[in-house]
Image: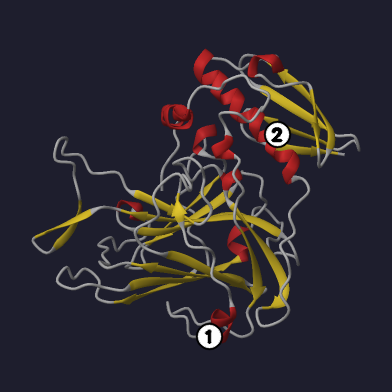
Amino acid sequence: MRKGFGIVFIFIFFSYGSFVKAQNIFSGFEHLFTPVCNYVVYQAVSEIEIDGKMNELSWEKASWTDDFKDIEGDKMPKPLHQTRVKMLWDKEYLYILAELEEPHVWAYYEKHDMIVFHENDFEIFIDPNSDSQNYFEIEVNAQNTIFDLFMPQPYRDGGVPFIAWNTPGLKSAVHVEGTINNSADQDKKWTVEMAIPFSAFQLGTASQTPADNQIWRINFSRVQWQTEIKDGIYTRKTGPATGSILPEYNWVWSPQGIINMHFPERWGMIQFSNNQVNEEKVGFQNLADNELYKYLWLVYYKQKKYQAENGKYATELSGISMPEAINNSFAGTLNFELVATPYQFMLFLSTENDTKKSVNENGVIRKFK
């Protein structure tokens, strides 16, 4: 898990180069607008035993996701080892099965909420409301040690992790094809299987059990360290010049475009189907609002860049090279209105059919009737 604190956000986010005025208002931010992955989650046909093994007919029928890629996308090398996921659901649980090819399976952390991303791990990020606020993170290592937390908002917007959240009712198991922590042999893979109760995502009194065709934001990450063996123990490799631990690899299902998992708007999308996994397949239904959201996020990114460079937010659209209106082939004419002070802002987007949405400096998106 890579945390996105303020100064880190500035240097990582803007390493792609300064914004250049051009006809394309997305120029300089293309890496944050690549298409995200999607997956239709079907219902299991029978009970799933959580044992880390893919024994059930439901798992056999479920499709694999695409293989994981580098977190920054196709511009980076292909991951060294294959990682892929399957998903199912029923009225109580979201089921996740992850397969991680690995010639050397190791993990030493055994206590709950130890920082397992300091070892090789598998991570799940879930935003049931798809609003980039109030999301959940569950991490696991090859010992089946869980590190889980709740985020009220991303680190970039001042979010503080609530580590006391412990995924009530979680069932998890890990199966290793090989021998864990044995440097004398080579292993094949380790498999993670989880049943995550929908009730674990409940905030207040609202139920989080999905409806047919409902879409959630989700992403998966695999943290992989370069290792060396010292006295039979796996350790993270250090650089010969500095003695510092070498950076980890971050391999993900849906590339973020930036080395930071805490950009929830960049996560992939899953669509729940009431069809059982052995029944008729359905197509993924892209939300019409996604075409509008990308403009809200563009202004958010531009304002954060402007603030990083000037110590304040732009109070005029011209300050961030945004027009007051554009023609969009999908949504028609889009009108923008910026209400801002040097310390906060609200961008309003309105369409020809009176749809109105907004985003503020905390990345909170609202819809207006």
Asked whether residue 209 is in view, the answer is no
Depth check: give the residue in front, 340 or 205. 340
* Front: mark 1 or 2: 2
Q: Mark 1 and mark 2 in contact? Answer it, CB < 8 Å.
A: no
Q: In the rendered image, which residue does mark 1 sit on?
A: 56
State the CA–CA distance, disc 1 to disc 2: 43 Å
The image quarter containing residue 40 is bottom right
What's the residue at 63%, 29% (across, down)?
300
Q: Is 238 displayed left or right of 299 in the figure?
A: left
Depth check: give the residue in front, 269 or 77. 77
Q: On screen, 275 above or below 131?
A: below
The image position of residue 12, as x and y in percent, is 43, 32
Q: On screen, 332 above or below 7?
A: below
The image position of residue 224, as x and y in percent, is 33, 55
Q: Secondary structure at mark 1?
A: loop
Label 2: few (<14), some or many (≥20) within 10 Å?
some
Q: Amino acid at mark 2?
A: Tyr
Disc ID at residue 145 = none
The image position of residue 260, as x and y in percent, is 46, 42
Depth check: give the residue in front, 69 or 349. 69
Q: How is the image coloured?
A: secondary structure
Q: Is 154 displayed left or right of 328 in the figure?
A: left
Asked whether residue 97 is in view, the answer is yes
Report the quarter where the C terminus lies: top right
What's the residue at 69%, 66% (across, down)?
272
Q: Amino acid at mark 1?
A: Glu
What's the residue at 53%, 85% (across, down)?
56
Disc ID at residue 295 = 2
What's the residue at 67%, 22% (across, down)?
345
The image position of residue 249, as x and y in percent, is 35, 50
Q: Is 286 displayed left or right of 308 in the figure?
A: right
